[in-house]
Structure formats: structure tokens, C-alpha cells
Amino acid sequence: MPQELRAVDWTGSGLALIDQTLLPHRHETMAVHDVDTLVDAIQRLVVRGAPAIGAAGAYGVALAIIEGEREGWTEAEVRAAVARVREARPTAVNLMAGVDRVMTRFAEGLDAVLEEAAAVQREDVAANRAMGAFGADWLLAKLQQAGVERPLRILTHCNTGALATAGWGTALGVIRELHARGRLEVVYADETRPLLQGSRLTAWELVQEGIPHYVQADGAAAGTILRGEVDAAIVGADRIAANGDTANKVGTVGVALACADAGIPFLVAAPTTTVDLATGTGDEIHIELRGEAEVLEWAGVRTAPAESRGHNPAFDVTPGRLVTGLVTERGVLEVSAGELPGDRLNMGRSVSSSELR
Ligand SMILES: CSC[C@H]1O[C@H](OP(=O)(O)O)[C@H](O)[C@@H]1O
């Protein structure tokens, strides 16, 4: 089921995006045939999740070429439109990387651009499947060493499933793999304020597959962890710096701090396309500040006094020292133990999990 769920699809003349602002109550697809609509869809989180917006950005290059032919744009105007897609959101490196990778084929024309965009999408699904296996292997081995043989209780934050990727999911892909192996007892899904990617999207994906779960308030996560109700937490990422500092949905660093205090694994699952070796540390990561209204109201109803202002960072940065393991399609890096992406992920070489463990 999840591998058939495609947040981003190319229709031959444009994009078909699952409108994630409508889930879980309405499952509708938005047709996108121009760049401005795609930029708006990325900024309103119609399509969201680092790898998913990376795929959308990749196909956005094709969209700009087609719209340019339709509107009689110059090459400079097409390139300017591509830049608008690339800059639609600042934190998830996958968006820039997806656009930049496809632009290497720009001079060859539309067919080559579409071929490269399809490769971005195809490779992400394969990476997620590999990540799921590596992550499940690592978790089961580590927890068995700690005497935990029973099915696992996993906490996750935000949505990192098929909706956030080209298919299967990153952190949720590991959770799917544990479930498939009969080694998952329950998932605690943080609702993930203010846009509720956890209660609206992760819960929806888990219901589709009958995976047992609780939705909990973000503020409940630390207590759930410190009370010993969770064996591990696993989250996604939007940008991972060369030293292992990780930008992810706001609220993630609190989960990591609680895991550190409780002495349980805190895992980040992300394809190597989310690792940005050009960013040395988390201090250099641009954290998207979103509109105040998202925290001051819900469904158009004001929840805070009219005089209140809203502070709405979309992400926070978890220091690498709190990241027990970075699960990639090339294996697991034990970041807090000193295995840094910048040193260990030779980006041109596939590495087995044992080599990285
Ligand atoms: C597969 S990683 C998805 C990653 O992206 C989410 O952010 P957003 O919903 O704002 O696009 C969140 O940080 C997830 O961990």
C-alpha cells in the first residue's frame, strides 16, 4: 500500500500532488501545470517533506520548460522560474539538490530533464526501502544487546512516510519495516503542532496499514519517554550538516533531549541526499520562519488573544551529540559516537551497514 501512495506524480504534462492540507478527511489530488502554482503548493505544504519537495522541485524544472514553451519565455525567464521553485522553502536541502541535479541536464532538453527527475524519484523510493531495512536491523540488534526481545514501542515526530517522500518513507519506513517483521508493538505519533503533520498525516498512513498507534500532544513526548513507555524514537530530517547536526520539524530537539536523558536511542532516518556537506554545523542552517497565524489560530478560529504575536519556526536543530544513529540507504552512522557524515559518507561509494556500524 504505502509504496503505491505517491505524494508527487508526473502526469505527462504536469504534476499531480496529493493535497496534504486536506488529509485526513479528504484525499484529493491537485493538478499543477505552472510554476507559480507549484511554488504556492510547496509553500502551503500541499506537497511537503524534504524528499517529496525534492522530487516536486526536480519535476518543477520540466514544468518551467513546458510553461516557457507555452508562454513564449526566453531561456532566462525559464531559468528565473526554476529559481523560484528552488527558493520556495529554505530549509530542506533536498529541494535545492533536486533542482540542481536536474538542471545539469537542462541543455539536453525536456526529455533529458524528465528522465533525471524520474531518477530522483525512483532513487528516493529505493533509498527509503534500504533505510527501512538498515534501521530495523540496527534497532533490533541494539535493543537485543540491551535485553529487549519483545516487539518495540517507537515514538516519531511529524510525518516522514510515503506522503513526505517519493514512497515508503524514511523514519516511517523503518517503522513499516519493523511492523512487517512483526517486531512493532505500538507507535506514539506526536501530533506536531502547529500544522499537525503527525495527527493528520502520520496517523492517516498508520491507519491505512492497521499499524497500532497513539496520537499524543507534542508536550507529552518527553514524559512518555522518561516514563519508560518508549524503546526508541526515530524522526526524519530536512538538512543534516557535515558534523551531524540535524534540522527537522520543530519539537524534534525536545524529543532528542528526552531520549538522551532516558538513555534510549534517538535515530534520524534520511537519504544521503539530505546530508549537506557544504553546511559545516547546524548553526549555518536557515530555519524557515512561517506565518504567525499558523500558531495563533486553527481552522480559521483564533485560539490566542487578538493582541498576541506568534513565533513560528518550522524547524529546530538537534546537535549531532544527541543523534544516536543516522540511518541512511548506505547504513547507520553512530553520530553521537563520532561517526560524522562528513567523514564517513563517501558520497560516491555505497557502504554496507556493517562497515558503517
Ligand atoms: C521525510 S523527512 C520529512 C520532514 O519534512 C517535514 O517538514 P515539513 O512537513 O515542514 O515539510 C518534517 O521536518 C519531516 O521530518
Image: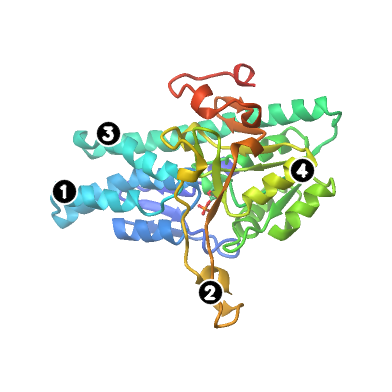
Residue 142 in sight here: yes
Q: Which mark is residue 261?
A: 4
Which numbered disc flags the more N-terminal residue, 4 or 2? 4
- Judged by depth in the image, the label closer to the viewer, 4 or 3, is 4
Distance Cα–Cα, label 4 vs label 3: 45 Å
- Judged by depth in the image, the label closer to the viewer, 1 or 4, is 4
Which numbered disc flags the more N-terminal residue, 4 or 3? 3
Q: Is residue 182 above or below residue 300?
A: above
Which numbered disc flags the more N-terminal residue, 2 or 1? 1
Query: Is 205 placed left or right of 243 in the picture?
Result: right
Please, what is the three-letter code of the amino acid marked with disc 1? Ala
Which numbered disc flags the more N-terminal residue, 1 or 4? 1
Distance Cα–Cα, label 3 vs label 1: 16 Å
Please, what is the three-letter code of the amino acid marked with disc 3? Thr
Residue 298 in sight here: no
Distance Cα–Cα, label 1 vs label 4: 53 Å
- Judged by depth in the image, the label closer to the viewer, 2 or 3, is 2
Q: Are marks 3 and 1 in contact (CB under 8 Å)?
A: no
Q: Which mark is residue 309?
A: 2
| Percent x, y of residue 231 | 79, 40
Q: Which mark is residue 76?
A: 1
Question: Which residue occupies the extreme bottom position in the image?
Answer: 306
173 and 332: which is toward the camera: 332
* Element type at mark 4: helix
* Mark 4 beta carbon near ligand 1 (under 8 Å): no
Q: Which residue is mark 3?
A: 104
Q: Quadrant of residue 299?
A: bottom right
Which numbered disc flags the more N-terminal residue, 3 or 1? 1
* Mark 3 beta carbon near ligand 1 (under 8 Å): no
* Element type at mark 1: helix
